[in-house]
Amino acid sequence: MQFYFIRHGQSTNNRLYAQAGSRQERSPDPELTEVGQQQAHYVADFLYRDDGVSVEEDAYDPQNVHRFGITHLYTSLMVRAVATGAVIARALGLPLLGWKDLHETGGMFLEDAETGDLIGQPGETRAYFTAHYPDLVLPESVTENGWWNRSFEPYEERPARAQRVLQDLMGRHGGTDHRVAVVSHGGFFNHLLMAILNMPEEGAPWFLINNTAITRVDFNAEGTTVVYVNRADFLPRTLLT
């Protein structure tokens, strides 16, 4: 299996932090900015490219010079990820599969301005996704009460969620020649990478990844290979965020 982790395009929260260095007035579920929308189209076009070389000749292509050949596409249910994934899905002609556990660290929350408490939010509803992203395949557990609808996710729950995603990923696609892409988030990426590398979280370095950057990890009989991390060479300099 080839595994591709794609961070979502720039969100309004990303832009707010870049401009003001503050998370005050952040949205619990931000939309993509215009820059984020452009990034989504660039990464979709990059993933779509195919130079026509036969699959046999493409047997080992660590830099995806010939093609990506994505076979399965999953997304977090946060709007910035779904919006990015929807552009990719249309370009690749693939169904976009919602996966709740791919959400950003903390989940859906707002900070109380007076107390500093982090208050969980419901998240978007099935009706919202059906209206705005009709091609998104939703888990049955997504209802009109919102897909999150729980308290803030504490730090200690995040490594276990990363392990759960890795186990689910291997259960669905391990031992196959599938090429699986997920659209997710920068914070969760760090937990998932630690799970993939079987490294302890304590004292681990932080991996900073750009919006719509791609990380590739290959799983095969010989073991696990991190092929590249934070690949964003397909973006023009003006769209690097």
Image (cartoon, grey):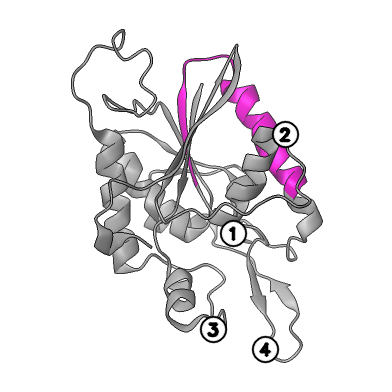
State whether residue 134 appears in this view. Answer: no
- Is residue 170 covered in magenta? yes
Tell me the CA gap for discs 1 and 2.
Answer: 37 Å
Expressed as whole percent of the image width and height from the top left, the position of residue 208 reads 53, 55
Between disc 3 and disc 2, the foreground one is: 2
The residue nearer to you, when weighing 197 against 114, is 197
SS state under label 4: loop
| Among the 4 quarters of the image, the one containing residue 172 | top right
Tag 3: residue type? Glu
| Residue 148 versus residue 34 in the image, above or below | above
Q: Main secondary structure of the magenta part?
A: helix
Between disc 2 and disc 4, the foreground one is: 2
Residue drawn 46% across and 69% down?
14
Tag 4: residue type? Ala
Q: Is residue 152 left or right of residue 238?
A: right
SS state under label 1: loop
Between disc 1 and disc 3, the foreground one is: 3
The label number, if any, that marks residue 25 in the structure image: 3
Tell me the CA gap for discs 3 and 2.
Answer: 37 Å
The residue nearer to you, when weighing 60 against 145, is 60
| Among the 4 quarters of the image, the one containing residue 94 | top left
Q: Which residue is mark 2?
A: 198
What is the magenta range? 159-183
Pointer 3: residues within 10 angstroms few (<14), some, or many (20+)? few
Q: Which residue is mark 4?
A: 113
Q: Which residue is mark 1?
A: 144
Between disc 4 and disc 1, the foreground one is: 4
Residue drawn 74% across and 60% down?
153
Q: Is residue 83 left or right of residue 148?
A: left
Residue drawn 27% across and 40% down?
46
